[in-house]
Each structure stands twice: as structure tokens, then as C-alpha cells.
């Protein structure tokens, strides 16, 4: 199964034997769920699955301890004890859960309590493959899973780049159908969105028609969500691995002297996995000195003479009284 898959833990037990001597005072199923799953709900059925017996059981789940309990009520115990000369079929408790972790292996057992006697069940084991969502950045408008990465490189304002959103294939022998699948990329403010397309990983096949692509200009969130036709293809043969496509997001850098970082999220059956982060920088712009044009030209020719005359006249005026006083001594 994959992260986000819904599945059922089916809790079964043997029949109560005929010719029992003691009444049943307690019938209780107790299952401490592994941390790799989330509890959803539970129901109780007859062994043939035809009769819903949930009303005869008190069902509870403690999120803190992860302990699920289904305990028979007085009405059901009355049915069990009505005729102890005959064997009595105990029901099946179906516990519905959702896998919440990728790249995990988890075991589970449960306990059946009959009066004060506890019996432990066998162990079941499940694994979930690792979801590897990868983001890359490429120069220009690329197609598919290109190797021409410019992650970490310096780019220029106005340069067109491609964010390539990839994820590893769905594994073979999947337990559940792929019900929802989408790529969500919140673009950095340092780029302008142009368009997006969906390709096979080799870049040879345009798969855009299988996806609903939308872009919110206010939040800068791009979404590419698989449509029903794509999900049908993915679920056609769950015994085989299924190659998931690449979403190429075409953007343009719009700022100088900026650090542009970006990640994206892949959603599979309502479960989110975050990709790596790519980063580019745009160089700063060195300002060119602007000449002071308050005076178009410096003083020339006769203007220098005029300035000199004014300066001498000012000096003479300043020394007029001291000079006169010196001549009259």
C-alpha cells in the first residue's frame, strides 16, 4: 500500500464452543493501532458479512494511546448466553484505517477478551514505499525529466526557467486505488508564472489533457490535478508499477539581487509529501554614477576675468579703510 491508502484491519476469532458451562460476562476486542496509521471508523459484522451487528457493541478509540475497543453490550451477551448447548459464532470487527507514513514497515496484533481471559491474535505486517517527490530547475522551456539542472546557479532578471516537478512511480501490487493525485506549487514572488504542461518522464508524450491545471494569481499557487481518465489508467492494473508524469512549470525571474527558493507538494489520496528545495540567485545591479548637471559648463574666457575682477573688488573694499589709514600716517 502507499501513504494515504485506506485499508481494513479485520479482527476475527473462533466460535464459542457448545456445552459451555459459564455465562459470558465480557466479550471485548482491543487493538492498539501502530503509529503509521490513522483510525477512521469501525463496524461489527456477522462472519458471513450479511448482518451489521454494530449496534450490539460499544466502540471507542483513544487518540492518545491509539487503543481501539469494541465491547459487547448486555443485549449481545444475552444472545450469547441464551443457549449454551450450541456453539456461538462471534462476529468480525472491521477497523478502517489510513496509512499515514511513507517508507515504513508496521505490524499489528489485537487481543480478544472473553470474561477475564485474554488471547492475542496473529501478527499482520504492512509496508509503504517511500514517496520521493523531487523538484528541479532548468533553463528555458524544458520537457519532461531533463538532466540539465541549473539548481544553485546564478540567473538573470527576465530569464525564462522551468520548474520540473517529479515523483517516483507507484509501486507494483498496490492495495488500493489511486483516488486523488495532484501537484501543488506555491511559486516564489521573485518569478512570474507563464504556463505549465505535463509530460511523460522521457519528455516524448504530452499528458496535459489528463490534468486540470489552475493558477491563482493572488496566492501564486499552481495546481495540476489528475482527472478521472488518468486515475483510471493508474488503477487499471495495480499488480504493475505505474510511471507518474513530470509537471513542467514555466516562469520568468522578475527581480535583481534576489534569492529565489522553491519547493512543491505532491498529494496522493489526500496525503501530502514535500519535495526538496531548489535555489537560484539573480545578481545585483551596480548603479552607474550620474554626473551633476546643475551647471552645464564651467566658466570660460571673459567670465574668468569677470570673476577675478569681482574678487579683487571685494578684496579692495574689504581693505579700503586700513589702506587709507596707512597713507595718512
Image: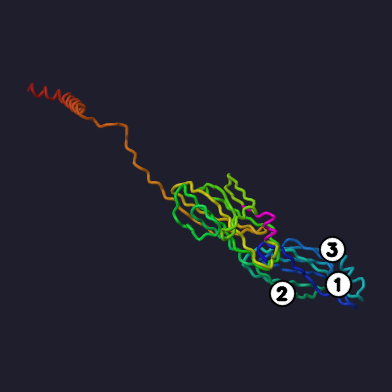
| The N terminus sits in image quarter | bottom right
Of helix, strand and loop, which one carries label 2?
loop
Q: Relative to 11, is 190 on the left or the right?
A: left
Q: Earlier in the sequence, mark 3 or mark 2?
A: 3
Q: Give me the residue at 63% from left, 55% from top.
A: 182
Q: Earlier in the sequence, mark 3 or mark 1?
A: 3
- Residue 272 on the magenta span: no
Which span of residues is magenta-colored? 224-233
Q: Mark 3 highlights which residue?
A: 52
Judge by depth and name the residue closer to the eye, 143 or 50. 143
Residue furthest to the left: 329
Q: Mark 2 highlights which residue?
A: 123
Of helix, strand and loop, which one carries label 1?
loop
- Residue 183 x, y percent position in the rendering: 61, 55
> Alpha-carbon neighbours of circle 2 within 10 Å: few (<14), some, or many (≥20)?
few
Name the quadrant containing residue 21.
bottom right
Q: Give me the residue at 84% from left, 68% from top.
A: 48
Amino acid at each position: 500500500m502507499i501513504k494515504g491508502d485506506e485499508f481494513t484491519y479485520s479482527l476475527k476469532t473462533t466460535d464459542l464452543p457448545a456445552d459451555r458451562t459459564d455465562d459470558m460476562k465480557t466479550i471485548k476486542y482491543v487493538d492498539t493501532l501502530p503509529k503509521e496509521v490513522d483510525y477512521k471508523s469501525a463496524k461489527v459484522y456477522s462472519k458471513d458479512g450479511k448482518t451489521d451487528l454494530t449496534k450490539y457493541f460499544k466502540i471507542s478509540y483513544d487518540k492518545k494511546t491509539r487503543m481501539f475497543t469494541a465491547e459487547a453490550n448486555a443485549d449481545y451477551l444475552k444472545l450469547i448466553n441464551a443457549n449454551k448447548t450450541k456453539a456461538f459464532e462471534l462476529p468480525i470487527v472491521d477497523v478502517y484505517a489510513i496509512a499515514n507514513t511513507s517508507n515504513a514497515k508496521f505490524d499489528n496484533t489485537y487481543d480478544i477478551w472473553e470474561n477475564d481471559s485474554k488471547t492475542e491474535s496473529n501478527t499482520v505486517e504492512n509496508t509503504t514505499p517511500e514517496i520521493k517527490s523531487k523538484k528541479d530547475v532548468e533553463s528555458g522551456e524544458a520537457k519532461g525529466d531533463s538532466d540539465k539542472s541549473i539548481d544553485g546557479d546564478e540567473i538573470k532578471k527576465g530569464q525564462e526557467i522551468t520548474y520540473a516537478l517529479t515523483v517516483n512511480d507507484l509501486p507494483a501490487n498496490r492495495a488500493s486505488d489511486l483516488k486523488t493525485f495532484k501537484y501543488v506549487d506555491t511559486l516564489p514572488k521573485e518569478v512570474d508564472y507563464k504556463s505549465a504542461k505535463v509530460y511523460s518522464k522521457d519528455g516524448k508524450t504530452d499528458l496535459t489533457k489528463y490534468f486540470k491545471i489552475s493558477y491563482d494569481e493572488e496566492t501564486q499557487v499552481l495546481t495540476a490535478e489528475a482527472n478521472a481518465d488518468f486515475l483510471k489508467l493508474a488503477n487499471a492494473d495495480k499488480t504493475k508499477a505505474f510511471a507518474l508524469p513530470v509537471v513542467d512549470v514555466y516562469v520568468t525571474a522578475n527581480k535583481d539581487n534576489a534569492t529565489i527558493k522553491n519547493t512543491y507538494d505532491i498529494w496522493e489520496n489526500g496525503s501530502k509529501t514535500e519535495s526538496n528545495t531548489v535555489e537560484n540567485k539573480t545578481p545585483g545591479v551596480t548603479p552607474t554614477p550620474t554626473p551633476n548637471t546643475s551647471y552645464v559648463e564651467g566658466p570660460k574666457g571673459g567670465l574668468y576675468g569677470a570673476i577675478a575682477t569681482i574678487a579683487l573688488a571685494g578684496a579692495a573694499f574689504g581693505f579700503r579703510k586700513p589702506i587709507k589709514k596707512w597713507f595718512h600716517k
